[in-house]
Image: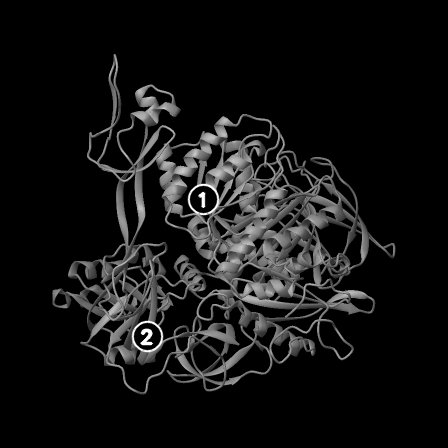
């Protein structure tokens, strides 16, 4: 059975295609080094407009309004500037109610763009621009330790990694945060208290990497100014031994946290990268693989959710589970000890 | 390379590329009748990381080869066309898809209640997500409407408005305002416009918009006052969705070629079967209801006197689609269906994990119960949303908050079909859809319905014979009286006359759920007498009559729990009641 891969790797070559949702301006060039928070492209997405009905304003038929309009498309206008006027016995004018830019003139109407907050595309990881994608973005390459998560709150940042989770089953408490951790990225186990997230904002951390989080905290996490990446899932789940070990070994190093939402179709995923010089022995990562004996896997849901292990055997017959479901399954030797029969649908490959 | 010739033989391969799984189904003649033989499945590979649906297609077909012991692909992975004596190849291929993101859409119409409503119905029939509407009498200033369109970044705009003999100035004014918005859209390489308004201005509209979009024309949705015809626009939209899918998932083109350029959206094929059943059952007093619960989308197809109403709800389903459920429904509505103690936090966590891993399976009894509770609410929500577009004049109980009379109910989807027991499948249907009156519940155990809809154009006999086969499980005739009665009081009297002449009478109390013994596929005559003014759809409250009933997996089921269904507010009583209902069905 073919399944996607989760990367939990000490050293990997990483390539990320970062693109705008629409055509825009690419701000980087090939070969350029970028930090995770560098803006690599921008586009006009969030615009607001005002429509001025010149015909009604001047008291003329729509087909005759154009001759009274004193602006053209592209003109910048200040608040109060005259857009159109009609002389004669009773002079009438139409003025711009706000500062803006004329973007359309059609059939007696003028459309003013009064607000335009550009959409800024950040690099999301520290690396080098491998190639640019005209009008859309760039491909960025990096190497280093790589841990992919399952959920993120949409923010990007980077900082020095500080490991609060000495054990994979660590329970994150607010008292563990103080101002000495300002500007750092925390690695913690499970978070079930909104006060922790709020305290982290007060302390001005640069990011949170959590093994798991109670899903009721999602609205709070989404409102935080720093990135939050959940590695294993929601509810009480321990950080996998493998992810814990890799991140712990990289304590005090700079880590990039890209907490973008997991889009399965596009292939974007929240992830954590510790930039390290590439070694000769690393190869391109696999993005999909067949489940097979000796394959390293991760269990995606309860029981054993978040745990990693190795496939001992793919069971030849359907296996019955306590829910009553019968499914194709594998016998897994778990990294934490013991073994378990897990439905193939509940496994993903770890690379 | 596969040619697009008409098949001369009998075997058909149906391939469906879903959002999570790709399935390959094989049909062939066995003992003179078409039968479903076997199915293979693989993860859909249309999106990242493989970005090529062909890989998933081939893996699904390869699994089918193993199960059916039939060679279907050659060494190069090409389909073997033409079945032969040595059990290789197929004679025909049909294909459906629901993978990929829904098209972002804008609906444009003159009047909210008429042309805009018709445009919405067209969009509802396929995998689209309505981002903004634009009408002359809608709320908001023109600039606000333009901004809404720009925020939506539509892939598709459906324009309706003006009868064919109506004024042209007003619709053209609307088009002009729309043009203002389209001019400001970021360059879009595939913006589609479907014009289905006043045909007198079709050419002017095309000329005004074709510089900014590909403009398609189809018959007016509202050709005359009081007349709404959406079928031509629905067909055209299906083609637009298909072409858009090729751009995003180019591997689908090969599947389209396999099927002789007949690849179609899964929901559309599903709807075809429901419309066909409407012709077969031909009961003017009842509609047909079909529901297909997918991972990302749920399709509800209803047919009233062959008038098909198809409502696809993208973003509502049992995988990523649970996000849609969570936005709309209180968690208590979900936990109420779980017969074990479970916290809302646990259910919320389960939902979010399922959104992340839509293909995952519930391994523990509690997780299964939560999953089946979710399925109930997904079906309930999908049906109520679809009900907004039901014809106003259809037959329904006089009581509020009940569905129209439907017979049969055809249910499809992995959670329903894959339940460990048929009783669980039936309970999900009865609790989630709350059928009223007298109906039959049919479970599509192998998720074949959409495939049969696609096959119909190629081979009209095949779907008929497969629908009649045991592949579709007749769970039972269900009698569900509607109306108020004292708890525990007699609600219904039944007399069952079996084929062998045996007679047995039953009294059914309010609040109960009973499975009356009747052998599977055995026929009986049943006299139903509703009491206390309740209605079973035999002519009004208190009206009874004789029925000819065919026993299902659960014989004849009487659901006297009331409509709408109410559960005890006390949690312990509620859990006991759920367990009691399940026990009554299975003993």
Is B345 on the left or on the right of A195, as rendered? right
Is A251 on the left or on the right of B346, as rendered? left
Residue A74 seen in the current view? yes
Chain of the residue displaying label 2: A
- The percent position of residue B156, horizontal first and vertical second, equals 48, 47
Q: Regarding mark 1 in the picture, which secondary structure is present there? A: loop
Along the line of sight, the residue nearer the viewer: B73 or A94 = A94
Residue B309 bears which disc, if any? none
Above or below, comparing residue B492 to residue A14 in the picture: above
Same chain check for tags 1 and 2: no
Residue B135 seen in the current view? no
- The percent position of residue B443, horizontal first and vertical second, equals 66, 59
Numbered marks: total:
2
Closer mark to the observer between disc 1 and disc 2:
1
Q: Quadrant of residue B520?
A: bottom right
Residue drawn at x 69%, y 35% as measured from the top left: B541
Q: Regarding mark 2 in the picture, which secondary structure is present there? A: strand
- The percent position of residue A347, horizontal first and vertical second, equals 46, 75
Residue at the limit of the structure toward the top, as seen here: A89
Q: CA distance from mark 1 to mark 2?
A: 41 Å
Disc 2: which residue: A14
Residue drawn at x 71%, y 50% as measured from the top left: B276
Along the line of sight, the residue nearer the viewer: B121 or B319 = B121
Mark 2 surroundings: few (<14), some (14-19) or many (≥20) residues within 10 A: some
Residue drawn at x 61%, y 47% as measured from the top left: B235
Q: Quadrant of the C terminus of chain A?
A: bottom left
Along the line of sight, the residue nearer the viewer: B133 or B561 = B133
Above or below, comparing residue B64 to residue B111 in the picture: below
Chain of the residue displaying label 1: B
Disc 1: which residue: B211
């Amino acid at each position: 059975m073919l399944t996607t891969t989760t990367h939990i790797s000490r050293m990997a070559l990483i390539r990320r295609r970062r693109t705008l949702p629409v055509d825009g301006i690419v701000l980087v060039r090939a070969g350029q080094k970028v930090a995770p928070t560098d803006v690599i492209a921008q586009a006009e997405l969030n615009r607001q407009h005002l429509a001025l009905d010149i015909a009604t304003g001047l008291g003329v038929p729509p087909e005759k309004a154009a001759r009274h309009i004193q602006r053209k498309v592209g003109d910048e206008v200040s608040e109060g500037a005259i857009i159109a006027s009609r002389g004669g016995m009773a002079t009438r004018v139409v003025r711009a109610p706000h500062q803006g830019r004329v973007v359309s003139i059609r059939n007696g109407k003028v459309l003013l763009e009064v607000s335009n907050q550009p959409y800024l595309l950040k690099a999301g990881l520290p690396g080098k621009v491998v190639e640019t994608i005209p009008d859309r973005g760039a491909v960025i390459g990096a190497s280093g330790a790589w841990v992919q998560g399952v959920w993120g709150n949409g923010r990007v940042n980077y900082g020095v990694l500080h490991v609060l989770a000495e054990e994979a089953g660590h329970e994150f408490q607010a008292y563990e945060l103080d101002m000495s951790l300002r500007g750092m990225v925390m690695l913690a186990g499970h978070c079930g208290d909104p006060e922790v997230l709020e305290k982290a904002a007060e302390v001005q951390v640069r990011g949170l990497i959590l093994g798991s989080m109670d899903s009721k905290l999602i609205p709070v996490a989404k409102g935080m100014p720093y990135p939050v990446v959940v590695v294993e899932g929601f509810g009480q789940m321990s950080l996998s031994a493998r992810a814990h070990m890799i991140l712990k070994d990289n304590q005090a190093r700079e880590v990039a946290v890209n907490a973008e939402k997991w889009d399965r179709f596009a292939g974007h995923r929240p992830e954590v990268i510790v930039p390290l010089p590439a070694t000769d022995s690393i190869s391109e990562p696999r993005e999909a693989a067949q489940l097979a004996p000796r394959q390293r896997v991760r269990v995606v849901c309860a029981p054993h959710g978040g745990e990693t292990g190795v496939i001992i055997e793919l069971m030849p017959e359907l296996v019955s589970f306590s829910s009553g479901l019968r499914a194709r399954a594998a016998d897994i030797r778990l990294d934490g000890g013991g073994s378990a029969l897990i439905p193939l649908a509940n496994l993903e490959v770890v690379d | 390379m596969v040619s697009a010739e008409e098949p001369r033989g009998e075997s058909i391969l149906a391939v469906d590329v879903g959002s999570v799984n790709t399935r390959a189904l094989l049909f062939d003649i066995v003992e003179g009748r078409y039968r479903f033989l076997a199915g293979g499945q693989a993860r859909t590979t249309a999106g990242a990381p493989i970005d090529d649906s062909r890989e998933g297609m081939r893996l699904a077909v390869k699994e089918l080869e193993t199960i059916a012991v039939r060679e279907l692909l050659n060494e190069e992975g090409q389909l073997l066309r033409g079945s032969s004596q040595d059990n290789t190849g197929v004679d025909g291929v049909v294909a459906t898809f629901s993978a990929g993101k829904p098209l972002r859409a804008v609906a444009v119409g003159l009047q909210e209640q008429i042309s805009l409503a018709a445009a919405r119905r067209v969009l509802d029939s396929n995998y689209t997500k309505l981002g903004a509407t634009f009408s002359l009498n809608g709320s908001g200033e023109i600039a606000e409407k333009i901004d809404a369109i720009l925020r939506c970044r539509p892939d598709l705009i459906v324009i309706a408005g003006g009868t064919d003999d109506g004024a042209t100035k007003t619709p053209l004014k609307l088009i002009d305002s729309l043009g203002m918005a389209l001019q400001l859209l970021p360059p879009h390489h595939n913006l589609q416009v479907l014009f289905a308004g006043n045909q007198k201005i079709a050419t002017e509209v095309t000329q005004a918009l074709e510089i900014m979009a590909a403009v398609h024309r189809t018959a007016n949705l509202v050709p005359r006052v009081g007349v709404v015809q959406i079928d031509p626009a629905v067909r055209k939209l299906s083609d637009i969705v298909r072409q858009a899918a090729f751009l995003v998932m180019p591997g689908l083109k090969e599947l389209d070629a396999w099927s002789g350029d007949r690849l179609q959206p899964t929901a559309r094929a599903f709807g075809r079967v429901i419309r066909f059943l409407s012709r077969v059952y031909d009961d003017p007093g009842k509609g047909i209801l079909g529901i297909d619960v997918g991972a990302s989308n749920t399709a509800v197809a209803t047919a009233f006197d062959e008038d098909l109403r198809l409502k696809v709800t993208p973003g509502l389903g049992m995988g990523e689609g649970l996000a849609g459920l969570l936005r709309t429904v209180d968690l208590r509505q979900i936990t109420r269906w779980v017969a074990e103690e479970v916290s809302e936090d646990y259910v919320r966590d389960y939902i979010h994990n399922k959104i992340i891993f839509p293909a995952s399976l519930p391994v523990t009894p509690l997780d299964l119960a939560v999953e089946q509770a979710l399925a109930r609410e997904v079906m309930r929500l999908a049906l109520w949303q679809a009900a907004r577009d039901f014809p106003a004049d259809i037959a329904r109980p006089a009581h509020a908050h009940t569905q129209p009379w439907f017979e049969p109910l055809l249910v499809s989807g992995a959670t329903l079909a894959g339940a460990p027991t048929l009783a669980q499948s039936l309970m999900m249907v009865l609790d989630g859809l709350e059928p009223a009156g007298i109906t039959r519940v049919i479970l599509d155990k192998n998720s074949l319905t959409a495939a049969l809809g696609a096959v119909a154009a190629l081979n009209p006999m095949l779907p008929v014979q497969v629908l009649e086969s045991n592949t579709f499980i007749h769970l039972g005739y269900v009698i569900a009286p509607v109306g108020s009665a004292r708890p525990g009081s007699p609600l219904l009297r039944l007399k069952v006359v079996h084929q062998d002449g045996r007679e047995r009478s039953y009294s059914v109390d309010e609040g109960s759920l009973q499975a009356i013994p009747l052998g599977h596929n055995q026929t009986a005559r049943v006299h139903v007498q509703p009491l206390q003014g309740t209605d079973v759809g035999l002519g009004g409250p208190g009206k009874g009559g004789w029925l000819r009933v065919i026993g299902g997996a659960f014989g004849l089921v009487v659901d006297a729990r009331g409509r709408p269904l109410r559960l005890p507010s006390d949690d312990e009583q509620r859990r006991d009641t759920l367990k009691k209902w399940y026990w009554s069905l299975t003993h």
